[in-house]
Image (cartoon, grey):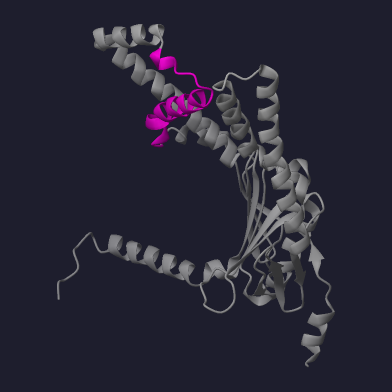
Amino acid sequence: MSTRQEAAVEVAWSALHRRVPLATAVLSLAVAAPAGIGATRILLGMDLPYALVAAGAAGAVLLVLVAAYVHGVARLRTTRFRLTAERLELRVGILTRQRRAIPRDRVRSVDVKADVVRRAFGLAVVKVGTGEHTSGESAELTLNGLAAAEAESLRRTLLSGVAARESAQEDGGQVLAGLRWQWVRYAPLSIWVFVGGAVAIGALKKVLDIFGLDVFSTSMAKAAWEWLIANPWISVPVVVAGSLLVGLVGAVGLFAETWGGYRLEREAGTLRVRRGMLTRRSLTLETGRLRGGRGGRAAAAQAGRRRQGQGGGRRPAQG
């Protein structure tokens, strides 16, 4: 056994953060709430007392939460990872055990992501990528449930070798770009502005259907529909304007959530993009990877465009 292999054996395996089960249970509320609503609707149709209906709905919600918590505990107990001098390794699997690894010298990007729930529990998701597709080693590895500080430390450690390979003249920590809220005027340049209103109405109808409410079958809704049909020159512009307004508000809100806090920074040997208001995301890419491969093709394409422009717009000869 070589010295490197012996060092790799001595590295202890680490576990996810102990708050992973609680975070998993809270995230399952997205499923637990509809389950409780569905149970309420079914039990109300059986003409049961309201106390039993409430108990049944609470039981459905509790069942989903407990199942999610148990799954989180199982994932916590069966997931282990370690960072050796040569690779990042992951062992995962509740029923079927899997072992994956990424060589450290192939790491090209580290994506750290945390939504509102994970931020409340101080957790983050780390996705490490090699930027290539190979049949041997895994091209991507995800650690779902690290402490935020541990995730940041892992990001810096994985990319420390990248910094060592870069020139000592390159500046670190330099802010290249930041969010300008004037950019929000580009948010309406989206298809969602035109279909957002219809999507919102459809989603609202789905929610009302879960509660067993059909507002479109009431006498008031029918009267409104008849009025819309009888006065198309008024109703059509009003409906279109209302739909555009809802879509516009949604597009602006989506822009703010996606790009709020945007910063592009140059660190030693890497470029880092941070963005997001509710779900915060940090993506770090190796600049050496950008300069080669795709970056080289992009530079060649740009040079070709310049040469075409200098040629006076003449078409190339057909051969």
> Residue at 82% across / 83% down in the picture?
7
Q: Position of residue 54 (x, y in %)?
A: 68, 23
Name above or below for residue 199 compared with residue 141: above
Name above or below for residue 102 compared with residue 40: below
Q: Position of residue 310 (x, y in %)?
A: 29, 62
Stretch of the chain drawn in magenta: 190-217
Q: Quadrant of the C terminus?
A: bottom left
**Between 311 and 182, which is closer to the camera in this rendering?**
182
> Residue at 81% across / 81% down in the picture?
9
Q: Position of residue 223 (x, y in %)?
A: 34, 6
Residue 167 falls within the magenta-colored stretch: no
> Residue at 42% across / 34% down in the picture?
192
Name above or below for residue 116 compared with residue 95: above
Q: Position of residue 178 (x, y in %)?
A: 61, 44
Provide the major secondary structure of the magenta segment. helix
Q: Quadrant of residue 215?
A: top left
How many numbered tags mark residues here? Answer: 0
Name above or below for residue 275 compared with residue 100: above
Asked if residue 293 lies left or right of residue 19, the reply is left
**Between 98 and 302, which is closer to the camera in this rendering?**
98
Q: Quadrant of residue 107?
A: bottom right
Among all residues in the image, which is located at the extreme bottom?
1
Residue 208 falls within the magenta-colored stretch: yes
Asked if residue 251 lies left or right of residue 109, the reply is left
> Residue at 62% across / 74% down in the picture?
106
Q: Quadrant of the N terminus?
A: bottom right
Asked if residue 70 lies left or right of residue 305, the reply is right
**Between 60 and 118, which is closer to the camera in this rendering?**
60
